[in-house]
Image: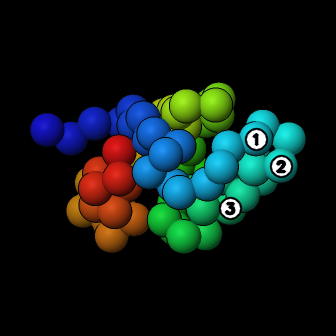
Amino acid sequence: MKTREFTINTDYLELDYDMDLNKNLIEDYIFEDLEIPYEYVESMNINDEYVKIKLSPTRLYFNDDWYVNLQRVG
């Protein structure tokens, strides 16, 4: 099923999570390593256990490579 909301466990990212130090690292991972375009992210919440990403409902991106990668880690 195609979804627009994803939850990624921070343990999967293999980072020792510390809100002050790693929030930027996690954002870099999301936007650079997973190559999710900024314009498709409606909201992103980062806490000590999860990264919750909500994608824009107005976009057609279900066949894009970055979306497929996001499904794998989400």
Which of the pair 14/41 is nearer the observer?
14
Q: Identify the residue shown where x is 54% and y is 70%.
A: 33
Q: Identify the residue shown where x is 72% and y is 58%.
A: 25
Q: How is the image coloured?
A: rainbow
Q: Secondary structure at mark 3?
A: helix
Q: Secondary structure at mark 2?
A: helix
The amino acid marked with disc number 3 is Asp
The reply to whether callout 3 and callout 1 are in contact (CB within 8 Å) is no
* Residue 21 circle label: 2
Disc 3: which residue: 28
Is 5 on the left-hand or right-hand side of 42?
left
The amino acid marked with disc number 2 is Leu
Instruction: Give how far across and how far down residue 73 sits, in percent.
Output: 35, 53
The amino acid marked with disc number 1 is Asp
Extreme-front residue of the structure? 16
Which of the pair 62/18 is nearer the observer?
18
The reply to whether residue 56 is visible in this rendering is: no
Q: Identify the residue shown where x is 65% and y is 29%.
A: 47
Task: Count neighbours of disc 2 (C-alpha within 10 A) and say few if under 14, some if 14 to 19, many if 20 or more.
Answer: few
Quadrant where the C terminus is found in the figure: top left
Nearer-N-terminus badge (3/2): 2
* Residue 68 circle label: none
Q: CA distance from mark 3 to mark 2?
A: 12 Å
Above or below, 7 relative to 13: above
Instruction: Give how far across and how far down residue 71 sits, in percent.
Output: 29, 51
The reply to whether callout 3 and callout 2 are in contact (CB within 8 Å) is no
* Residue 18 circle label: 1
Instruction: Give how far across and how far down residue 27 sits, in percent.
Output: 68, 53
Q: CA distance from mark 1 to mark 2?
A: 5 Å
Above or below, 6 relative to 28: above
Q: Secondary structure at mark 1?
A: loop
